[in-house]
Image (tube, rainbow, N blue to C red):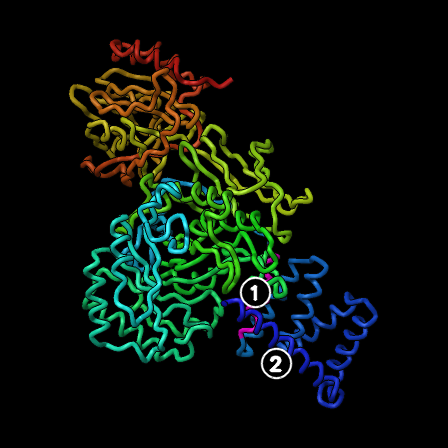
Amino acid sequence: MAFQHLRKSRLFKRAAALVLAAGLLAGATTVQADPVWDRWKAAEAAVGSGKPEEAVPHWKYLVEHYASTGDWQNAALFCGKLDEYYDKIQDYENAIHYYELENEYWLKFGKDWGAVDLQRAEQIRTISDVYMSTRDEELLKRQAAPSNGKLAKFEPEYGIYIGMYSEQDPAMQNQFTKSTAIYGKQHALYLAYSPYDNAFPKQYAARAKEAGAALQIAWEPSKGLDSVKDDAHLREWAKAAKASGIPVFLRYASEMNGDWVVWHGDPQKYIEKFRLVHDVMAEEAPNVAMVWSPGDVPAYSMDVYYPGDDYVDWVGVSMYTEPYENGDPAQSNMQATSPIERLDYLYKTYSDRKPLMISETAVSHYAHIPQESFTDYGLLNLHRLYEVMPFKYPRLKSITYFNVDLKNRESRNNYLLGANDAMKALYTKMIAAPYYLSKVEQGAKPADRTGYIKLSGAAGDPAFAERTKLIPWVKIPDIYIGKIDYSINGKLIQTQSGPPFGIELDADDVPDGSTLKLDVYNREGNKAASRSFPLSSQVSVKINGKLQKYEQPPVIKDGSTLAPMRAIFESMGATVSWDAATRTATGRKGDTTVSFKIGDRQASVNGKIVELEAAAQLINGSTLAPARFIGEAFGGSLQWDGKTRTVLIQTAGGVAVNPFGANGTVADAPSKRADSAVPYSQDADAAASPPGSAQLQLNEQKPDSSESGWLRRQLASSYQLAYRSFKAVAALIYSLIPRNA
């Protein structure tokens, strides 16, 4: 139904163009300035002779002329001639410019007729972005947080609730406990529709509770807004909602910006009634979160219905992705439109202060009117819906899939996942990741503490630790993607020809200063897009199995890894002091005292001089020294996982988290554990009071490469005397560390 608005926009624009032409032909010679009329005649003559390219400079002149005089209607209409011309010759950059300009001028004219222009601009826009997985929890929470830092009711810190409308799914219906058997995972919430005049849907709530889920209720005042009153019915409904004992997302009178619902047309009354419902729920049912949920179109008429921040917990939206407008090939072909750009306006307008949910959505894989299968279209856009949108829009925190085959009604599209094996398999595979949350809880987050950040394509993007997954967001004017080639430093590492798009990389796959390149081809084999991204992995450190992190990361100097001394010492139970006068750092644990000066290549261990592979340095207020010396200074042992570029430190007496398999090789997936991270900062001039739990991330390359010669020097130094009992262990460790050729 939402596509009806786009069709009206096209009709209005065509009518306006006819009015313009009639006006100019009837009296332009007397009303308009001569240059304007001359340009008009010249443009028409060029088009009439089959040379539209010669009309372009005249159309540009007319756009500038009318815009300068504030005649936005005529400026928009001549933009329309330019965008259609450039679109036809596949000069998409210029076409996008004039489509966007046309929309801008229509809005200045007081009309939203440019919606179709923005839609077409997005259809032909080439996009090649990449999102990278990370376990930097502070970064993930920051990008997903509202501007005031306060989470809304039931809002997760990051991650996205998965929801489903299953009532018309023959395999599941309202037996929500079947979700795991059918889709491999429980859903966080289920959707139920309920007329306003009906009692609270207790049976739906009971089934949701049985499944450990929440309930989204689309509450529809089908008798009009005047039927909504603060009366016994409303109060009893609210009390029953509270008695359900589950989180309830109340989507009251949704899609109010569309003329297909009876509660459309009176924004002030709508706001009054929404606030009334909010107030009653606040008094009677604190487990109810109010969801204000317009349709994605018409976009520019939704804001007048917004009840205000004090009355809205979540902002939702209804949006569907289907190959033909209203399911009818006689109307517009919508195959070039993805679901992603359709959230953009709502996200920019409300996400800084409210979490967003896609209240109901689906992707068609079959159009019943023409009886056409659209499996490739469905897979492409289902992937975009679930594996691109949540990462592009981190404030999007819930998606509910409308799992229905509308064979004989409304859009006549089949959205039912179970009716298409490939669609069901893709959906099941995508939602299996912990990022897709299966339980509604305040401040929920993925069990593996993993999320995604966008790569900027410029230097300065964070390096990844251990391993990462890269997910591309690729769109080309040709619509369907033939293949995507992924290359690292000019070497092809993987090719994919269909969704789900994305590759996994270990840290060892990405040498320092690497470049990732995406080459995108259409189905004819022609390259349609290409983009490069600087990409780096970092050396990681785990102490007793826990991944470490610091504000001041380790650095690489002349082939040696320098790590924050205080943090590692304190994690090993040592105390640390700093002598600002001599610029000396000292660590003490039991009978062992270790000290070294900034800039000196020698350290002291219980008074014995030890040669360091590199001098200790003061960087951003933190003392950094060679990682191996720091790790072994108090009897720790080291291992090296070359695949993930991770230094594994086991402290004396520490609780071992064995990262190795029975055969002595590194276990398959250490990055899949949900390691917690506590930030750490330290000023080297501060007193040696413990700052708390410490964690570390190392950058760049593996420590102690064969070029450094650190152990060879150590074996010839007095350090051997101080650690005579540790010599055999150190030799073993040295043998395990990979050498550069």
**Which amino acid type is shown beneath numbered disc 1?**
Leu
Query: Which disc is residue 118 wearing?
Result: 1
Q: Which residues are magenta?
A: 112-125
Q: Are marks 1 and 2 in contact (CB under 8 Å)?
A: no
In the picture, measured across the screen, residue 255 lies left or right of residue 3, that is left
Q: Earlier in the sequence, mark 1 or mark 2?
A: 2
Q: Residues within 10 Å of mark 2 (few under 14, many from 20)?
A: some
- Image coords of residue 73 (percent x, y): 61, 78
Q: Residue shown at 29%/39% (left/top)?
A: 677
Q: Quadrant of residue 273?
A: bottom left
Badge 2 element: loop
Q: Nearer the viewer, residue 586 or 469?
A: 469
Q: Is residue 428 visible?
A: yes
**485 w.r.t. 217: above or below:** above
Which label lies toward us, 1 or 2? 1
Q: Position of residue 277 (x, y in %)?
A: 27, 71
Secondary element at image label 1? helix
Q: Is residue 197 above or below residue 88?
A: below
Residue 61 percent location from the top left of the image? 70, 73
Residue at the spot 23% in from the left edge and 33% down from the top edge = 578
Is 546 situated above or below 365? Answer: above
Q: Which residue is mark 2?
A: 71
Q: Amino acid at mark 2?
A: Asp
Residue at point 73%, 86% (across, down): 28
Q: Is residue 647 magenta?
A: no
Q: Relative to the observer, which residue lies in front, 564 or 655?
A: 655
